[in-house]
Amino acid sequence: MFSLIPDIARYPTYQVFMAVVVALVLAIVLFPAWIRLLKFRNIGQQVRADGPQGHLVKQGTPTMGGVLILLVVSLVYLTLGEVGRSGMICLVALLGCGFLGFIDDYAKVVKERSLGLTARMKIAGQAVVASAIGILAVNWAHVSPEVIVPFVGTIDLGVWQSTLTVGGFALEMPWLYLGLVFFMVLSFSNTVNLTDGLDGLAAGTVMIVMLAFSAISFAQDNLELALFGAAVSGACLGFLWYNSYPADIFMGDTGSLGLGAVIATMAVVTKTELLAPLLGGIYVAEGLSVILQVASFKLTGKRIFRMAPIHHHFEMKGWSETKVMVRFWIVTGALAGAGFALWFVARARF
């Protein structure tokens, strides 16, 4: 294990702190060269024509900043602290959905269109990654298929279970729990992707949510997950230096799909599946705003919001991009803090 001071393993709090700082510094140092390379290769954002007209000035801004975020997180996690099965599953989620996002970003850049991969292709790729995460969590990291309900007890989602033999290995398949993991990975991956519509919005909210997961992991004496969450938070914070308004670079689907999948996976390996919608409540709001907008328009011909996702609604009401971003950060901080407090109190009483 790489160490910055003698006997660093004796100071777990210091390790988590250093994971944030090292990831932050690496991101700040490396992003200028990455931005120059993207500009040299003309890898720029393709802005949706049907989005807010004020965003058209962002056309051509370097994108695929998520590539460097993923590399920084991987480097810090693999070299600075403990590496275990739960953390490796989180890394699989980050890189798996991140690679899918990379393909999507590449399609946008090469074809010079804002939509990238088709919805079916993207969902199919996410489904493969989500299935792998669920199977690995249960069979490799030995995550229980029971779901904890705060202040109530547990729900056993392993009641409908079968065993599959693949290549000589017997895989336990608790179908209800695997379905929950599948739903969570796809939901968070896509809603974080929806949130990535304003400068600094997705990176800032992910930083806050992952800090909450890191705190929960640390309180569970799970240092490897605390380090992983800290590395993600630090990388996002470093990225924000260049992604703050007006952004010099965007994370692209490489970052948003990968980071969304990691949020869902952290909830699975920390056994906070039912708290995830509270900790990441801002993503629930973003996703619901799109669902309600589409449903309302199809059923009544009327729109609930001026534009969806909901962050664009506030833009259309006259809020500046920075005001929307900061207020969404504040809401995320409040929700993440409430989620951590709820988990802590429930753990203390039961």
Image: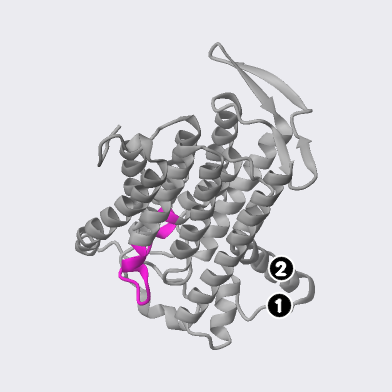
- Residue at 55 percent of width and 65 percent of height: 333
Disc nearer the start of the sequence (2/1): 2
Q: Amino acid at mark 2?
A: Leu
SS at badge 1: loop
Q: Amino acid at mark 1?
A: Ile
Look at the image and tell me whether residue 94 can be seen.
no
Direction from residue 305 to residue 77 in the image, left or right: left
The answer to which image quadrant residue 269 occupies is: top right
The answer to which image quadrant residue 32 occupies is: bottom left
* Vertical position of residue 227 compared to residue 137: above or below: below
Q: Where's residue 302, x and y in %?
A: 73, 79
Q: Nearer the viewer, residue 257 or 212?
A: 212
Mark seen at residue 292:
2
The residue at which mark 1 appears reads as: 304
Bounds of the magenta span?
239-255
Direction from residue 88 to residue 138 in the image, left or right: right
Q: Where's residue 182, x and y in %?
A: 63, 41
- Residue at 57 percent of width and 59 percent of height: 191
